Amino acid sequence: MKQHLKLHKEDEPVSSEAIPQEEINLLAQKLFKRSRRRKEQLISRLQTIFTKATDKDFLVIHSPGGWGYTQWEGLLEWEKSIVTGVTATLEKLGYSYAVVQYFRSGNSWVRYVKDILKEARFFFTGASPRAEVMSEELKIITKHLAGLNVILVGASQGAAFNNAAMRKLGNQERVYSIELGTFFPHMPRRIVTGRTLAIDSNGLMRDPMCQRDLWAGTRSYIGAFYRWFKSRAQGKPIKFTHCINTPGHEYQWEYPAVHTNITEFLTARFGMRRETKPGR
C-alpha cells in the first residue's frame, strides 16, 4: 500500500470560496481572546479545511499519537498505514475524500516544555482545552458542509484525544471516530457509540498500553530514551517516537484484526456510493 497522501502545506494558496469567514473569525475571537497567534492558527486551519473538503464526501482528520505534532513524513509507518487504509477503503466504496492532520501541540522543544502540564493533565484527568477547540471547529464544518461526513483517526494518545472531542460533541451527527490503542488511563472515561470504533488489540498480542501493564510501558520508554540519546551521541539523531518499541502497541493495517474491523465499520455505516454529485 502506498504510504503517502497529499496533505496541505502552510504555503499553499487558500481559496475564499464557500468559507464562512465571519463565523470563523468570531469563533477565533471567542476561544482565543488574548492570543493572536492561536487566533491566526485556527482561522488558517478552518480555511484550509473548507477549501479541501468542499464538494467532498468525507473529511479524514488524523490526530498524531505521542505529543501530537508529528507531521506526515515523520510518522511511524504503521500509523501511516491506518490513514492510508481508511482512505483506500473509502475510495473502494466510491467516495471522495480530503485528508488533514490535526496538531494538538507545538512543533519545537519550547512548545513541548510549555505543553507538559497540559499533556499531563489530559493523561490523568481527561481534561483537554484543545479537544474543546476541535469540537467547536467540527460544529462549524458540519454546519456549513451539509453533505460531508467527518472521520477522526487516531492511535494511542491521538485516539484518546479524538474521543475527548467526541465526548464534547455529544450526539453530533456525521462525525465518526476510529480509535486504536487508547492508553489505559483514558479507558474509564472513554465513550463508545455507534459512531465510534475502538480497537484495543492488534489481534496478534495484547497491548500493554491498553491493559495497564506499567512495567512493559516503563521499560519501553526507558529503552526509548537510551536509543534516543545514543543516536544523538553517534551523530545520527532519530525521532523519539521512532525509538519507542512496545510490542503489541502497533496497529499495522495489514493485521487482520485491524483492517477487517475498520473495513467492516466503514462499510456498515456508509455502504457503497450509489449517486454521483452534479458536476462530478
Image (cartoon, rainbow, N blue to C red):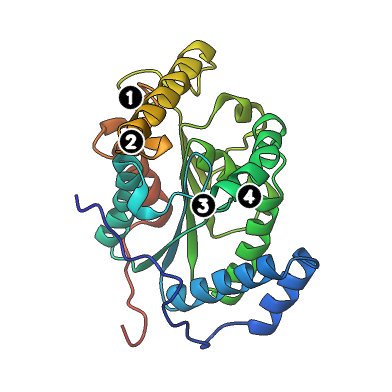
Badge 3 element? strand
The alpha-carbon separation of the residues under discs 1 and 3 comes to 23 Å
Return the residue at label 4. Answer: 165
Give the number of marks. Answer: 4
The alpha-carbon separation of the residues under discs 4 and 3 comes to 11 Å
Badge 4 element? helix
Badge 1 element? loop
- For badge 4, the amino acid type reads Ala
Mark 4 near mark 3, Cβ–Cβ under 8 Å? Answer: no
Q: Is residue 225 left or right of residue 39?
A: left
Percent position (x, y) of residue 70?
Answer: 44, 49
The alpha-carbon separation of the residues under discs 2 and 3 comes to 17 Å
Q: Earlier in the sequence, mark 4 or mark 3?
A: 4
In the current view of this chain or complex, which residue is farthest to the left?
A: 1
Q: Earlier in the sequence, mark 2 or mark 1?
A: 1
Percent position (x, y) of residue 267?
Answer: 35, 51
Q: Earlier in the sequence, mark 4 or mark 2?
A: 4
Foreground pick, 65 / 109 = 109
- For badge 1, the amino acid type reads Gly
Return the residue at label 1. Answer: 203
Q: Earlier in the sequence, mark 2 or mark 3?
A: 3
Mark 2 near mark 3, Cβ–Cβ under 8 Å? Answer: no
Disc assigned to residue 258: 2
- For badge 2, the amino acid type reads Val
Q: Is residue 170 visible?
A: no
